[in-house]
Image (cartoon, grey):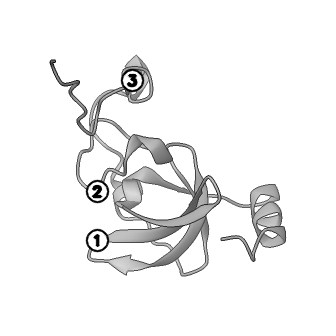
Amino acid sequence: MPRRSGGLRSGTRYKLRIKSRDKGAHNIAKQLQDFKKEDIVMIRTIANCHSGMPNSRFLGKQGKIVGKKGRCYAVSVLDGSKAKIVVAHPVHLQKLGGLAVQISKTNEGVV
């Protein structure tokens, strides 16, 4: 029986699509952004920046910054009911504020 290929980008045809207005050079400010520990962030994968790209399973998830590993950040994210650590480059992270921070503070014991 043939085996199904299952690489890191399998099943991401629409998840990692780049809109025409977003094509081109990366924003340098996004690459240089800093986060503090306990900041609430959302994982927003940018497909044409391959360094520090998290798995597509975590696309759109929000979590807390746990620490820093080299140029990347360790983010604690819930995968179902289990907390997991995702290492991602700052290009793929977006800082959240307002209502998202209030919601995450109510679920503080979970993450």
Q: Secondary structure at mark 2?
A: loop
The residue to which callout 2 is attached is 52
- Residue 21 lies left or right of residue 61; in this view the side is left
**Looking at numbered disc 3 in the image, what kind of residue is underneath it?**
Arg
Q: Are marks 1 and 2 in contact (CB under 8 Å)?
A: yes
Name the image quarter holding residue 26.
top left
How many C-alpha atoms fall within 10 Å of the one at disc 2: few (<14), some, or many (≥20)?
A: some
The residue to which callout 3 is attached is 17
The residue to which callout 1 is attached is 71
Q: Is residue 4 visible?
A: yes
Q: Secondary structure at mark 3?
A: loop
Q: CA distance from mark 3 to mark 2?
A: 18 Å
Name the image quarter holding residue 13.
top left
**Along the polypeptide, which appears first: circle 1 or circle 3?**
3
Look at 36% across and 51% down and name the residue there: 54
Q: CA distance from mark 1 to mark 3?
A: 25 Å
Image coordinates for residue 85, horizontal then vertical, percent: 45, 68
**Along the polypeptide, which appears first: circle 3 or circle 2?**
3
Q: Is residue 44 visible?
A: no
**Along the polypeptide, which appears first: circle 1 or circle 2?**
2
